Every structure is written in structure tokens, then in C-alpha cells.
Image: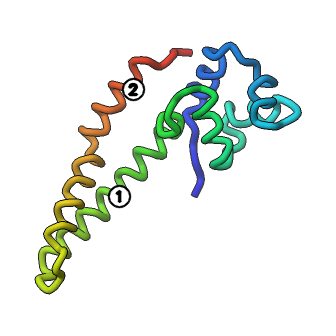
Amino acid sequence: MARHITVPYLRALRRRSAFSQEDVAFLLGAFTGTRVSRHETGACVPPLDVALAYEIIFEVAIADIYEDDLRRVSAEIRKQARTLHESLAHRVKDPRRHQKRSALKRIIKRCSPNQYEKEIITTTRHRPHC
């Protein structure tokens, strides 16, 4: 699955930390800042371990770095959860259907655009602007 980093945000996080691309590259175990530059421009998508390293280095949730992907995945999960929720309504022989439907309702609520927008507004207040 292709990932899309919110490019200006990653660069802004690095600048806010006062690190150069070479500094961050060193922390990542790379020899030059080229790797970091490629991540900041969106030319290259970092593997999960590097994305997690960015989370540690910049003290920001990985979900904030992959904001666009989070929206897309959230919409997909919400759609699938609704389908499963409706399907479980007709599975009267499933002894755990009520528990499952309750869990699915919570997932749907967490993945709703309005709920997600509230979380974005809260987290973006602390974001640096480019």
C-alpha cells in the first residue's frame, strides 16, 4: 500500500527540532541526509521502522505524519464496519453478536469524519507552520 506523508509537515518537524537533514540521517543510521530529503519531498516513502523513528525523534504521533492515509484508511474501516454491523443483525445464532455490534458501533463512531475532524483540530493547534 502506497503511503503519502504530509510533506511540509515532516520538514517543519525537522526544522522545529533544529536538526539538519544530516543530523536526522545520523539518528536513522544513514550516512547522508539524502534519505531524509527524499522522505521530506515525498520522493521516497520511509519503511515502518523509519516512520516510527520519526515519531520518536520529533515527538509526534505517526498518525499525524500520515494524516492523509489515516483519513483514507478510516473511511475504509468505517465502510467495512457498517457492512459487518448490518450483517450481524441477521446472524441470530452468533452468541457474541451483541458484543461484536457494540464494538463495531464504537469503531464506526471513532472513524466518523466529524470525530476525526475534531481530533485533527486538536492536534494541529500545536503544529508548526511552514
Residue 111: image location, x then y, percent: 30, 48
- Using the image, determine if residue 52 lies above or below residue 82: above
- Label 1: state its secondary structure: helix
Residue 20: image location, x then y, percent: 76, 19
Residue at x-position 59% and y-position 53%: 2
Mark 1, residues whose alpha carbon is within 10 Å: few (<14), some, or many (≥20)?
some
Mark linked to residue 13: none
Q: Is residue 38 left or right of residue 8?
A: right
Which image quadrant for residue 98?
bottom left
- Label 2: state its secondary structure: helix
Q: Amino acid at mark 1?
A: Ile
Mark linked to residue 123: 2
Q: Nearer the viewer, residue 113 or 15?
A: 15
Asked if disc 2 and disc 1 are in contact, CB closer than 8 Å, the reply is: no
Residue at x-position 48% and y-position 46%: 69
Q: Which residue is mark 1?
A: 77
